[in-house]
Amino acid sequence: MSDPPLLDIQDLVIRYEKRKGAVCAVEGLNLRLERGKTLGFVGETGAGKTTAALGIMRLLPEPPGKIVSGRILFNGENLLDKSEDEMRSIRGGKIAMIFQDPMTSLNPVATIGDQITEMISLHSDLSRRDSIRKASDMLDLVGIRRERAGDYPHQLSGGMKQRVVIAIALACSPELLIADEPTTALDVTIQAQVLDLMKGLKEAFSTSLLMISHDLGIVAEFCDDTAIMYAGRVVEYASTAELFGNPIHPYTRGLFGSIPSITGGKGDLRTIPGLTPDASNLPPGCPFQPRCDIAGPECSKEAPRPTEVKFGHYCLCHLNRGENQP
């Protein structure tokens, strides 16, 4: 019998309650992340990726955010049943998160050494002296000289700030690391350095990684499995090699068709017509059907259910069942 996944999200529904009605940010989310693996979580801005991550951490702003139903199993235990005190011990200790902008993640009036030390002290029994020493070791690990432990965030470059955020996240060797667009604010060269650093540290600490990104190149290189999200729903899920080699959902195909080829092929790039729908006013049936070039009559009447088109490859589409591809 195989071991259960480290993270198993089942039928998760998250809504934001507003005066004019509820906005369904995440609808029926199902995700599995195996131990030691990296899962890529891909989608446009507003697809619900960050909301799902905040739901896992139990950090949704309440109100207006609310987890309506579903389960988030971590090591077989439902995080939604945990008290706030229990979640405080889990956050940072067992599950850590790297946010998009390091400037909003770091305390501007505390030194970087103190901020790493504080995380270690909160989640370990080490003495103050040992916590400081471990904080300096973490700076070494992420490529920052330990002599800079007394620096403040404003004294560091963008790439160095992100390295400090990674050091804080990994200081207590969490089992799960959630990285929310960790390279968005960085230039291309620094992006590559930070991603290589994360990959090496993930392997060194035996950490599972949920990588939230809109960059398909990053996902292709770093992720074992990939989930494509649209309008709060995972529309396609498979191993990264399978998904990139055989995309099935029309939205996934549209994303891949919009990527320029390095071989310099001629012709215009494919585009997806229309705009992402308003989450407070989704179209009937399949949310993607107004933009879909193969939509049929049933697509506007009934929401599709996930179908396993081949082993481990799931697609949320009425028409694409594996054998009916355009």
Image: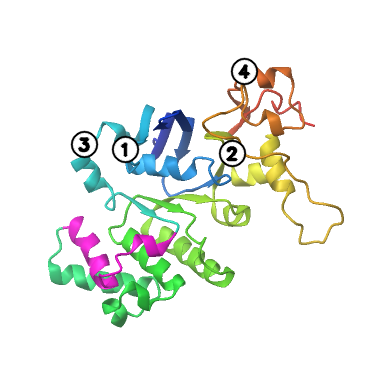
CA–CA distance between discs 1 and 3?
15 Å
Name the residue beneath numbered marker 3. Answer: 83
Measured from the top left, where is residue 91 in percent x and y? Answer: 28, 49
Say whether residue 120 is magenta: yes
Say whether residue 68 is magenta: no
Quadrant hosting residue 321: top right
Q: Which residue is depicted at the point 41% across and 44% down?
A: 53
Name the residue beneath numbered marker 2. Answer: 238
| Segment colored magenta | 101-124
Q: Which residue is depicted at the point 37% across and 63% down?
A: 165
Q: Residues within 10 Å of mark 2 (few under 14, many from 20)?
A: many
CA–CA distance between discs 1 and 2?
33 Å
Residue 31 disc label: none
Which SS class for mark 2? strand
Pair 3/4: label in front: 4
Q: Nearer the viewer, residue 152 or 64?
A: 64
Name the residue beneath numbered marker 4. Answer: 302
Q: Nearer the viewer, residue 18 or 84?
A: 18
Q: Amino acid at mark 4?
A: Glu
Decide if residue 29 is in sight here: no
Q: Is residue 26 left or right of residue 124?
A: right
Name the residue beneath numbered marker 1. Answer: 62
Given the current orientation, which residue lies at the most extreme bottom position?
147
Pair 2/3: label in front: 3
Q: Earlier in the sequence, mark 3 or mark 4?
A: 3
Tell me the chief SS of the magenta region. Answer: helix
- Residue 304 lies, with reference to residue 268, above or below; the image says above
Q: Nearer the viewer, residue 180 or 244?
A: 180
Quadrant hosting residue 21: top left
